[in-house]
């Protein structure tokens, strides 16, 4: 590992930087320094030199300033820290909601191990802070279970989308008389993105579907065509091949991030994150620019 999260220290990589001293501090967050040395370790394209007065560098430094602000506030408010072992596990075996990010990082030849570690740290902190915020809102978890159980359900779903109820009924008849669901879907569906494949991967959270579709998927008998289900997109014939959840109250309290849809999680985390950055003591080296008083990033020198 290039840094130890528990101590909140940032450790430099073994590269030289064009701005002179390899330990030059380019930003400070609540007393902890970010060096040009560390920033140069994040991308192969920086090579042996790094120009700190570019928009690319300011954007990347801003992301690391925000990450460090989250590190500090997560520990201060909730006692949350992240270990090297947890970071390594997140990179090698991320939960489904983060799998695409780490697959993208693995395929990216420019980002380094240090960059992946920083993203792993941030994703863990986001999950844990969000869980604390959700648990801290009295009655919220029980209300979701009572009012929107389909939002806590996931599964593997295929569908055929057509333009009318009569067309949907014809699709059901074809399937019930023995035609393959995927073959029928490929023949008539208006959803060319999914065709006859499962929608959005397997499993996918039903909370990401429009309400009518989610409700039907949450109650449909497994491996049977169900419909017509009318939504804003048209008429659907649905087949649910696997369903997970809804969780029990105890399961949801233990790990709300696993079950709640992404939009709900962001609704809890984003306001907290904005306030965490505003509450942090942030300074930026004059060669880089200055931290915006509204907390939106780094302004170039002279602005």
Image (cartoon, rainbow, N blue to C red):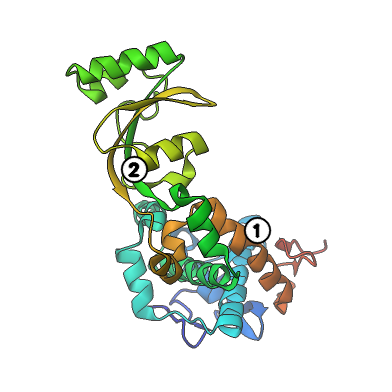
Q: Is residue 51 visible?
A: no
Quarter holding the N terminus is bottom left
Residue at 46 percent across and 86 percent down: it is 6
Q: Position of residue 40 (x, y in %)?
A: 51, 69
**Secondary element type, mark 2:** loop
Q: Which residue is mark 2?
A: 201
Residue 83 in the image: above or below residue 157: below
Q: Residue at x 36, y 67 (%)?
A: 90
- Compared with 197, 44 (above or below) is below
Nearest to N terminus: mark 2 or mark 1: 1
Q: Which residue is mark 1?
A: 54
Which x, y percent locates residue 4?
A: 44, 83
> Which residue occupies the foreground of this view, 186 or 241?
241
Locate residue 293 relative to residue 13 in the image: left or right: right
Rendered location of residue 144, percent (x, y): 52, 57
The residue sitting at the front extreme is 146
Q: Residue furthest right?
A: 303
């Amino acid at each position: 590992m290039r840094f130890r999260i528990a101590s909140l220290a940032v450790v430099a990589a073994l590269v030289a930087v064009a701005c002179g001293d390899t330990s030059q501090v380019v930003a400070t967050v609540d007393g902890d320094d970010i060096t040009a040395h560390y920033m140069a370790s994040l991308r192969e394209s920086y090579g042996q030199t790094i120009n700190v007065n570019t928009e690319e560098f300011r954007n990347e430094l801003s992301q690391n300033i925000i990450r460090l602000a989250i590190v500090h506030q997560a520990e201060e408010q909730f006692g949350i820290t992240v270990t090297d072992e947890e970071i390594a596990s997140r990179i090698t075996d991320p939960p489904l909601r983060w799998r695409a990010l780490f697959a993208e990082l693995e395929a990216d030849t420019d980002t380094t191990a240090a960059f992946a570690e920083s993203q792993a740290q941030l994703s863990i902190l986001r999950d844990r802070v969000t869980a604390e915020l959700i648990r801290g809102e009295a009655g919220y978890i029980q209300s979701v279970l009572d009012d929107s159980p389909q939002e806590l359900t996931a599964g593997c779903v295929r569908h055929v989308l057509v333009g009318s109820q009569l067309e949907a009924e014809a699709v059901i008849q074809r399937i019930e008389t023995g035609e393959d669901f995927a073959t029928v879907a490929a023949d008539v569906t208006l959803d060319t993105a999914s065709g006859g494949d499962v929608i959005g991967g397997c499993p996918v959270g039903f909370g990401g579907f429009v309400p009518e579709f989610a409700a039907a998927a949450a109650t449909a008998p497994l491996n049977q065509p169900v419909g017509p289900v009318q939504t804003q997109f048209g008429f659907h014939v649905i087949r649910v091949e696997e369903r997970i959840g809804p969780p029990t109250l105890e399961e949801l309290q233990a790990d709300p991030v696993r079950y709640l849809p992404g939009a709900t999680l962001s609704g809890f985390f984003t306001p907290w994150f904005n306030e965490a950055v505003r509450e942090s003591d942030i300074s930026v080296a004059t060669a880089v620019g200055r931290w915006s008083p509204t907390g939106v990033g780094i302004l170039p020198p002279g602005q």
